[in-house]
Image (cartoon, helix red, strand yellow):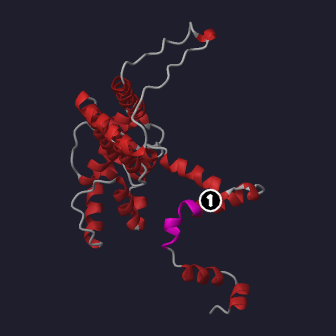
């Protein structure tokens, strides 16, 4: 529980759809600091004493595993197995090895060269919406170098001058009571509130879409594969790709479908065709 309860909590937090990059990196940094803090002999003693206390009521006391010899054909390639004198030494090694492996895995996944750039882009997007200047953000010149053929930089610069005023107007008209925009999802909601938002700030919206093309976690993709196993079973192996797409998308986004008014959808579907109107008696 000392190690895996923390990693499980962070793993659950990373699977939230509304996460942004800053939230994810903050969670990883918190977990890394926690692991370094418990990587001491004092915390291991707490862990080891807990194992001994649980072993009394569940099973026998901890004991050393039987030493195993390497096959003769692999003797020259495998390291000599370590022999531990006491159970304490054995679990002491296991404890620190697990922590080191977790830290190495976090570093290899979340300390890639692309993450600092994404953090700067995210700060740039939020600072433009809040008309504030954040430290360590990218400039329009940097965006021009990376997205030279995707975004009209001159038009983006003009849009940024009007963007805070648009958000302020929408915030006041809709009584949203937003003091500061801290989530990129909030920016999307404000842009989609009025139809003019998409057209008036098309380059800024394009920058948002390009930012979202780089996934920070694979949780959403893994959910899709899990849903695929539930939808396309052995009894549905002849399902075509088109029908599979039509079935799996509502299954993945079923929370949004539950919010729809089915009676209104049925009425709209019937009203599109005269034969349906005659059959269902729709007026």
Per the picture, the main secondary structure of the magenta-coloured stretch is helix
Q: Is residue 139 visible to the viewer in this orientation of the structure?
A: no
Out of 282 and 218, give the one closest to the viewer. Answer: 218
Asked if 186 appears above or below 89 in the picture, the reply is below
Nearer the observer, 15 or 102: 102
Residue 207 visible in image: yes
Residue shown at the point (55%, 82%) measured from the top left: 264
Give x and y (percent) for residue 132.
21, 48
Measured as percent of width and height from the top left, residue 12 is found at 40, 50
Q: Quadrant of residue 153?
A: top left
**Number of numbered discs:** 1
Residue 257 is situated, as x and y percent measured from the top left of the image, at 53, 69
Quadrant placement of the C terminus? bottom right
Relative to 133, 207 lies left or right: right
SS at badge 1? helix
**173 is higher (above) or lower (below) than 77:** below
Measuring 35% from the left and 38% from the top, which residue is drawn there?
51
| Mark 1 lies on residue | 248
Drawn side of residue 72 relative to residue 54, left or right: right
Q: Quadrant of residue 217?
A: top left
Judge by depth and name the residue closer to the eye, 141 or 67: 67
> How would you rate the neighbour count of disc 1 (Cα within 10 Å): few for under 14, some for 14-19, many for 20 or more?
some
- Image: magenta residue range: 251-259
* Residue 206 spot, x, y in % from top left: 44, 50
Quarter of the image for the N terminus: give it.
Answer: top left
Check residue 58 for magenta coloring.
no
- State the residue lying farthest toward the top: 76
Q: Is residue 254 magenta?
A: yes
270 vs 92, nearest the viewer: 92
Q: Is residue 208 above or below residue 97?
A: below
Using the image, determine if residue 122 lies above or below residue 44: below
Residue at (38, 62) in percent of width and height: 189
């Amino acid at each position: 529980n000392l190690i895996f309860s923390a990693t499980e909590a962070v793993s659950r937090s990373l699977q939230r759809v509304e996460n942004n990059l800053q939230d994810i990196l903050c969670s990883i940094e918190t977990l890394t600091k926690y692991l370094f803090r418990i990587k001491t002999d004092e915390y291991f003693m707490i862990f080891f004493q807990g194992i001994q206390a649980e072993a009394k009521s569940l099973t026998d006391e901890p004991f050393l595993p039987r030493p195993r010899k390497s096959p003769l054909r692999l003797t020259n390639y495998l390291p000599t197995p370590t022999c531990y004198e006491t159970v304490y030494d054995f679990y002491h090694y296991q404890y620190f090895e697990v922590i080191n492996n977790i830290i190495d895995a976090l570093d290899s996944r979340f300390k890639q060269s692309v993450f600092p750039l994404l953090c700067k882009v995210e700060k740039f997007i939020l600072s433009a919406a809040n008309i504030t200047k954040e430290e360590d953000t990218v400039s329009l010149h940097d965006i021009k170098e990376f997205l030279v053929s995707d975004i009209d930089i001159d038009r983006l610069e003009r849009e940024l001058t009007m963007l805070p005023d648009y958000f302020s107007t929408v915030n006041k008209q809709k009584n949203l009571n937003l003091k500061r925009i801290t989530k990129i999802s909030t920016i999307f909601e404000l842009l989609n509130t009025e139809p003019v938002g998409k057209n008036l700030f098309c380059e800024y919206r394009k920058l948002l879409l390009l930012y979202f093309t780089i996934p920070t976690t694979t949780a959403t993709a893994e959910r899709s594969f899990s849903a695929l196993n539930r939808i396309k079973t052995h009894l549905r192996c002849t399902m075509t790709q088109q029908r599979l797409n039509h079935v799996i998308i509502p299954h993945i986004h079923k929370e949004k479908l539950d919010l729809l008014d089915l009676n209104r959808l049925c009425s709209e579907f019937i009203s599109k065709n005269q034969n349906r109107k005659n059959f269902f008696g729709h007026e």
